Image (cartoon, helix red, strand yellow):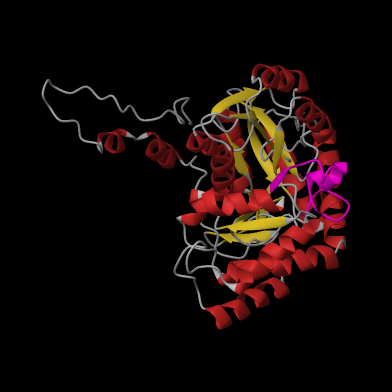
Amino acid sequence: MITSGYNKKPDTALQTKKGEILDLFDKCRTFTTAKEVMASGFYPYFRVVESAQDPEVMVEGRNMIMLGSNNYLGLTNHPKVKEAAIEAIKKYGSGCAGSRFLNGTLDIHVELEGKLAKFFRKDAALAFSTGYMTNLGVISSLAGKDDVVVIDKLDHASIIDACRLSFADVRKFKHNDMGSLEFVLQECGDRGKLVVVDGVYSMEGDIAPLPDIVKVCKKYGARLMVDDAHGIGVLGETGRGTAEHFGLEKDVDVIMGTYSKSLASIGGFAVAGEDVIHYMKHHARPLIFSASPPPASVAAVIAALDIIDQEPGRREQLWHNTNKMMKAFKQMGFDTGVAETPIIPLVMGEMEQAFMMWKLLGEAGVFVNPVVPPAVPQGHCMIRTSYMATHTDEMLDRALGIIEQAGKQLGMIS
């Protein structure tokens, strides 16, 4: 059984005899919790997938229905995406052998940035090697020790780490609470202020109330950045994300996104005004001191952006699947929290319940992700499910039958 100490950090303040030198690796040797969980058969991480990120995957030789991927539009195995990546390798090789700042900017990087700027209807774009590095680069370059970064309490971990790198004063406001946001901004005075929110929250599946956030930001002279990793390809009339969803593309100062969800690759980007992007190019350390995104990844994103425009039916099918699952879960009696996107959590409560549910579903052939503290508050553990445009009704019906049976077995539903 999972112990309540599963997420405890190893004790780094180990007792030593007077004058004895503490070995830095002592904490590694004394960290046994994960191994204990592995031995119990309840370890849900680093599972090895032996196939493409399709609606059904092979895991350790077993076929499973994939309800744990962020491949929302199902593009990672799309023929045009794969062909674009192959052709890029043929032309440019496998890597750039340098940073964007020096020898690592290829014409294909410039092409992608132009396409991203046009796609998101902004002046300019900047491509990074990962989404994590994008947040680090954007926030740490724009905000400094005399500024304030104001973040939602449920913002992604990369945003929190970026704030630490920036040396700015960091303030948090209650999740999607405009009264809390206004109170924090009011306290910031006349300092430079950057408000950072997720467009779609990756665990809860809810959408940031951008119209209200924009109004408060303008009132207090704050700039607004939206991490739209989970909104791109999903929200908006044409899949441009949360800002398009609310008709606020001109009111969001910086949109950040990743390629590892709907854009079928690896990497990240920021789109903003020309002067802002130019400044980032010369001040974002994660850009300047990291190797460039490989050509195959860049070409895959270019192809994925085209497909989003050319095949709007994928987004329609994604929402058909999302609405089908949301309706079924509610009818069964599951608590789906505040979800309103293709991310639908099943709230389990305590950690033991979440891991038991994960194990039952896995044994029956459904791949899901258990979410426990610190990713969610204590007592709010969940099973995170997420959906693709390429799931069929037959696959989803099979999954629903398995989930219902497991829920009844654990007493989650009647």
Residue 348 seen in this snapshot: yes
Residue 381 lies in quadrant: top right
Q: Quadrant of the C terminus?
A: top right
**Residue lying farthest to the left in this orientation:** 19
Image height of 369 relative to 282, above or below: above
Magenta-colored span: 233-255
Query: Which residue is located at x 80 percent, y 33 percent?
Result: 214
Q: Position of residue 264 (x, y in %)?
A: 66, 62
Relative to residue 331, is residue 77 drawn left or right?
A: left
Image height of 69 relative to 112, above or below: above
**Residue lying farthest to the bottom in this orientation:** 90
Residue 390 seen in this snapshot: no
Query: Which residue is located at x 76 percent, y 33 percent?
Result: 336
Q: Position of residue 251 (x, y in %)?
A: 81, 41
236 is within the stretch colored magenta: yes
Relative to residue 214, is residue 154 drawn left or right?
A: left
Question: Which of these two is toward me, 164 or 367?
Answer: 164
Question: Which of these two is toward me, 245 or 30?
Answer: 245
Q: Position of residue 364 (x, y in %)?
A: 64, 49
